Amino acid sequence: MEHAPRMDRIKSAMFKLGSEPKNCISWLSQSPKSRLEAVEFYRKQHSILYGTQSRLQRVYTKKICKKSSL
């Protein structure tokens, strides 16, 4: 069984109610690598809690159109 990934609690901070930073500003202040790691962390948490769910399959079709002579 896969273990849940651990959250990095080193970077946590406490703020007084009403003086906390806006989520968007806080999120964008993180490095791209850190943001991807956070998204991956939540994706793994979701799959552990809810299991993998079937997804829609992408189907590509190639349509060949003949040129009409006018």
Image (spheres, grey):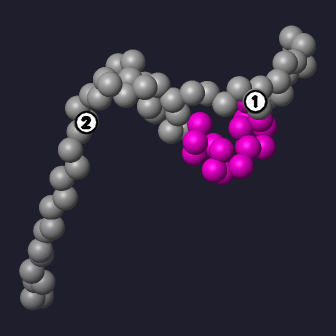
Looking at the rendered structure, the secondary structure element under dot 2 is loop
Give 62 or 35, whichever is nearer the viewer. Answer: 35
**Residue depicted at x 20% and y 44%:** 57
Q: Is residue 48 left or right of residue 15?
A: left
As drawn, the label of residue 55 is 2
Q: Residue furthest bottom?
A: 69
Three-letter amino acid code at the position of disc 2: Arg
- The mark nearer the N terminus, 2 or 1, is 1
Residue 34 position by quadrant: top right
Label 2 and label 1: CA atoms lie apart by 35 Å
Name the residue nearer the viewer: 17 or 60.
17
Q: Is residue 38 above or below residue 60?
A: above
Q: Is residue 9 above or below residue 69?
A: above
Where residue 68 appears, as percent x and y from the top left, is 10, 83
Residue at point 78%, 37% (across, down): 25
**Residues in magenta?**
23-38
Residue at 9% x, 88% y is 69
Q: Is residue 42 visible?
A: no
3 relative to 35 in the view: left or right: left
Give the mark toward the camera: 2 or 1: 1
* Amino acid type at mark 1: Ile
Q: Disc 1 designates what residue?
A: 10
Instruction: Name the quarter where the N terminus is drawn.
Output: top left
